[in-house]
Image (spheres, rainbow, N blue to C red):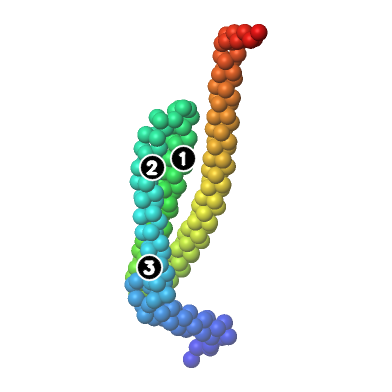
Amino acid sequence: MSACTPRSRNGSIARQLFAASLFAFAALVAAAGPAGTDEQQADWDRRLERASALQTEGDTKKAEAEKLFEERKTACYRKFLVNRCLEAAYDDYIVTVKEGRRQSNEGKAVERQVKKEQLNARDMQRIADTPQHQAELQEREADTAAARSAAVAKEAEMRAKKAQEAAEGAQRKAGEAERQQRKQAEHEARVAEKKAEAAAKQPRAPAAPLKP
């Protein structure tokens, strides 16, 4: 009969615990189903809905910017400072189109991230069916968590950029309006000055003779 050392007993217990924990993990993943847990599925649905809304809003904003730009171009040709008016209309158009494109791209990025997570969930389900691939499963889980964190950070960065661009756009628009007003005032002052000069140059009518 062979002796059973403490080291061999500990190794046997460790293997049994590892096998039991691996089996439990695989059972949990299998119970969640290939599409993930109900909570995860609800999160995917919410994010996909937001992605769709962002893309729709972005496309609508770009289409409205096109329409408004055409209307403003027509109106500019009836103003005195035509080129200045056209430049201001184009600047506003570009700002709105960029914002619309940013929203549309953000929606597409969110949609791609969700689809990637769904694909990883299906892959993890397949891996869970073969417990010996636990290391691969853990690596995929870590990759998914890292990708999700990166996506959250990217969304926060894009929101901050959006706020900054909106503030810069408002400041630029206010500056343009001030320049327009100043140029209009200068133009009116020049017109008034020319009228005054012309009036001063006109000969005065002779005074009527005094009655005796």
Label located before the other in sequence (3 or 2): 3
Q: Residues within 10 Å of mark 2 (few under 14, many from 20)?
A: some
Label located before the other in sequence (2 or 1): 2
The residue sitting at 38% across, 59% down in the picture is 53
Query: Could you tell me how far apart the alpha carbons at marks 2 and 1 are, in whole angstroms?
Result: 10 Å
The residue sitting at 56% across, 86% down in the picture is 5
Left or right: residue 107 versus residue 157 is left
Q: Nearer the viewer, residue 176 or 146?
A: 176
Question: Which residue carries the number 1 mark?
Answer: 92
In the drawing, what numbered circle is on residue 45?
Answer: 3
In the drawing, what numbered circle is on residue 68?
Answer: 2
Tell me whether the residue at label 3 lies in contact with that at label 2, contact meaning CB atoms closer than 8 angstroms: no
The kind of residue tagged 2 is Leu
Q: Secondary structure at mark 3?
A: helix
Tell me whether the residue at label 2 lies in contact with that at label 1, contact meaning CB atoms closer than 8 angstroms: yes
**Is residue 105 something that shows in the picture?**
no
**Is residue 153 something that shows in the picture?**
yes
Q: Nearer the viewer, residue 152 or 97?
A: 97
Indicate whether 182 appears above or below 69: above
The residue sitting at 57% across, 15% down in the picture is 199
Q: Secondary structure at mark 2?
A: helix
Indicate whether 156 appears above or below 19: above
The kind of residue tagged 3 is Asp
Disc 3 versus disc 2: nearer the observer:
2
The kind of residue tagged 1 is Asp
Q: Nearer the viewer, residue 134 or 173?
A: 173
